[in-house]
Image (cartoon, helix red, strand yellow):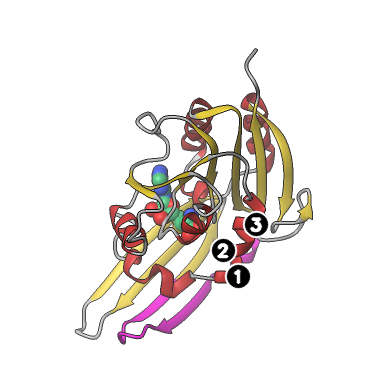
Amino acid sequence: MNYGILARYYDALVKDDEATLQWVNWIGRRGRTLLDCACGSGEITRQLAGLYEQTAGMDLSPDMIRAASAKDPENTVTWLAGDMTDLDSLGTWDVITCLCDSVNYLDRQGFIQWLDQVHDHLNDGGWLCFDMHSLDRLEEFDQGYVETGTFDDGTQVQWVIESEEDRLYQDFAFYLTDGTTLQEHHVQHVHDPAFVEEELKRRFDIASVTTDFDLPGLQPGEKYFYICRKKETA
Ligand SMILES: C[S@@+](CC[C@H](N)C(=O)[O-])C[C@H]1O[C@@H](n2cnc3c(N)ncnc32)[C@H](O)[C@@H]1O
């Protein structure tokens, strides 16, 4: 499963305290309860738990959930393994988030299914906050991008990102000191914002669209950020 091997190295590879704070400030306090879909190793989720009375983080990868839970001995967050396209066992929430391009793991059908689930599992007037890759990412990676590094335990990593049509392919190779090589291959779907906004408007009021946190509207940049509100039922 994806993020099985990566879970061991995720924080060493991408943890960024400044960016975590930006996400937390962007979401802020919008109610009493928050569910973070695709919470990964839980860096942002744990910070958000300081703003909410009840916080849960869920992720498809049990290894990521184990890594998140291990960093939270006081259980400030309820950690759950599961697929965000099926939230049926999780009740309803004031705020649902999905951060750091996690929605790009869903294809169009999966994204629509997730929006339906989010709508069903938000309280009236509840908030959906998520970000996704911008269209610029396709051009950025069309010639391929390679990053290499070495972790404290001596494991070497190679991370390759390439784009093709509307997809990003991310290949991770970990070269362990005992000679073992472990690999993961990820596919992400870069969604057209016109499609995303049409689907959002069917279910929510769009309160804000920004690029890279605070640039107004859709602009050249890495990620588009959406804050949406579930319409009140009469
Ligand atoms: C780029 S990481 C982001 C993690 C976290 N949101 C963060 O900010 O660090 C993407 C995460 O999405 C999770 N994921 C992918 N597809 C999922 C799905 N269908 N349901 C729940 N989680 C999923 C992966 O397991 C991974 O932990």
Question: Secondary structure under badge 2?
Answer: helix
Q: Is residue 74 left or right of residue 179?
A: right
Bin the neighbour count of mark 1 within 10 Å (Cα to Cα): few under 14, some 14-19, many 20 and up. few
Q: Is there a contact, CB below 8 Å, between mark 2 and mark 3?
A: no
Q: Are marks 2 and 1 in contact (CB under 8 Å)?
A: yes
Magenta segment range?
138-159
At horizontal 37% and vertical 41% (from top left) the residue drawn is 83
The residue that mark 1 highlights is 18
Is 226 magenta? The answer is: no
Q: CA distance from mark 2 to mark 1?
A: 5 Å
Camera-nearest residue between 55 and 17:
55
Dot 3 or dot 1: first in sequence order is 1
- Between 229 and 154, the residue placed more toward the observer is 229
- Report whether 87 appears left or right of 21: left
Q: Residue furthest top?
A: 234
Which quarter of the rendered picture does the N terminus lie within? bottom left
- Callout 1: SS: helix
**Which is more N-terminal, label 3 or label 2?**
2
Q: Where residue 199 sits in the image (x, y, percent)?
A: 62, 30
The image shows residue 184, relative to residue 232, as above or below, that is below
Callout 3 crowding tier (Cα within 10 Å): few <14, some 14–19, many ≥20: few
Q: Amino acid at mark 2?
A: Thr
Residue at which label 3 appears: 25
Q: Which residue is mark 2?
A: 20
